[in-house]
Image (tube, rainbow, N blue to C red):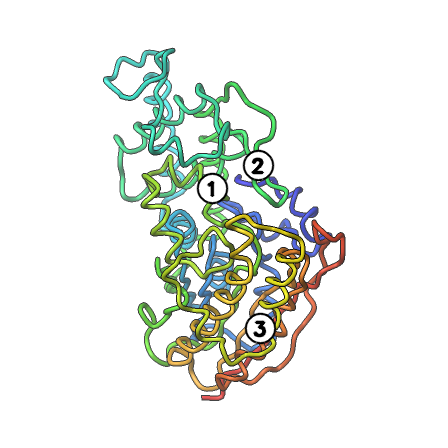
Amino acid sequence: MRLPFEELAELGGGVNDLQPEDRAVHRWYNFVLSFPPHLVRQYLGSFGTGPGQSVLDPFCGTGTTPVECKKLGIAGIGIEAIPMSHFASSVKTDWTPDPDGLVAHACSVADHARELIAADQSGWQPRTADGLRTLPPDKLRLLIKHSISPVPLHKTLVLIQAIEGAHDSSFSAHELLALASVLPTEIGNLRFGPEVGVGQIREDSPVVDVWLAEIKAMADDLRIVGTGGDTPSMVCCADARRPMQVLEERSIDAVITSPPYPNEKDYTRIVRLESVLLGFMDDRSGLRRTKQSLLRSNTRNVFKADEDHTLVKGHESIQRIARKIEERRIELGKTSGFEKNYYRAALLYFGGMKRHFAGLRAALRPGARLAYVVGDQASYLRVMIRTGQLLAEIAESLGYEVEGIDLFRTRMATATREQLREEVLILRWPG
């Protein structure tokens, strides 16, 4: 699995832990910063949402909300702009593979991969000086340095060839997701805490065995959850700031989501290794296109042509924070390109969220309830950003009713060691 679930306790004092009863399907591929399934259940219950209704997660990530909805027999819709995360969410909501058939097919793939590894006589290019398969330079440059060692990379590329060569539409997507799940921490050298970084260097890894064990765990989960019956589930690869590109008017009864926070986390970096190896990202232009489709939440996805900041010109509380960030930068003599964009990133974030809230109104049925998990931030030169309060102001200006802001958990700020609030903003759309 992508992140050892025991490590999640470090991220939220236990409240963010994946409970044992929730592991089925959710564990197939887990985003380090995702919110827990029990939070989804809590708000579905609070909103009185059940079968026959539709729930949206417009910042879907790796599919916590649609997976949990499917478990409860509720139609779920997700929107996710990062292709790797979209793929994970789509596979996690597809419970149609026969578990025994999946294992049998994967065992056949594993046997073939082992044969190829033992005697690799293919014409694969490029290769290292030691004769190992590797990636083209453009792809290698996208990876975090030392994120995977040469031998495990060689074996992984062979396994991907074996999976694609034995392609079966009933199983191949699940087989690739199982590989994505184990790539960062069991094949590669990455660690999450919650930032992604390089941990202990693994010179070799039993790649095929690790992958096959994940397949068998996936099959066990499919035996638990069944096929999901007739419960519809859909995940769209799209920009959440423009939800009506993929949603129908008055089709949504509830929203449960966690958008990015205004900080310096590059969400494409967290999934970079599997994105590159599985072919979701080929070069820097592809990376740029992905970043352009995201809500602007960090300076690494700020572009000259961005205009979302114009949408919050009239919100003085947001303008005040931006001015304070820029004044602090000048006071401290910070002159890097990223630091000069701190104030702009904050404005673009709240402008992008305003665009999202404004566009979403057409998809909501009258009386729809919404829950947004958001967190206070102090990433920009320790200027406090009360995200929940500011988003509440924006939503209210667009006609939403603010029902409350619930405390979800507190967490320690890396820079200031202060306790920051993580909250759930509760809205209602009156129609």
Viewer-side label of 2, 1: 2
Q: Which residue is mark 2?
A: 197
Q: In front: 160, or 396?
A: 396
Asked if residue 94 shows in the view, the reply is no
Provide the residue designation for mark 1.
Answer: 218
- Quadrant containing the C terminus is bottom left
Secondary structure, mark 1, is helix
User: Image point 47% across, 70% down: which residue?
Assistant: 351
Q: Residues within 10 Å of mark 1 (few under 14, many from 20)?
A: many
Is 267 situated left or right of 245 in this image? right
Picture coordinates of residue 129 (x, y %)? 36, 12
Q: In this orientation, does residue 131 appear?
A: yes
Q: Badge 3: few (under 14), some or many (20 or more) residues near its Cα, within 10 Å?
A: many
Query: Sequence order check: which comes first, mark 2 or mark 3?
Result: 2
Residue 318, label in figure: 3
Q: Amino acid at mark 1?
A: Met
In percent of width and height, residue 109 lies at 34, 28
Residue 315, horizontal then vertical, whole percent? 54, 79
Q: Residue furthest bottom?
A: 431
Examine the rendered structure and indicate whether residue 1 appears above or below residue 147: below
* Disc 2 and disc 1 in contact, CB within 8 angstroms: no
Nearer mark to the viewer, of 2 and 3: 3
Name the residue furthest right: 418
Q: Nearer the viewer, mark 3 or mark 1?
A: 3
What residue is at 45 percent from the left and 61 percent from the top?
295
Above/below status of 200 relative to 102: above
Q: Amino acid at mark 2?
A: Gly
Give the distance between the C-alpha atoms of the residues marked 2 and 1, in whole angstroms: 27 Å
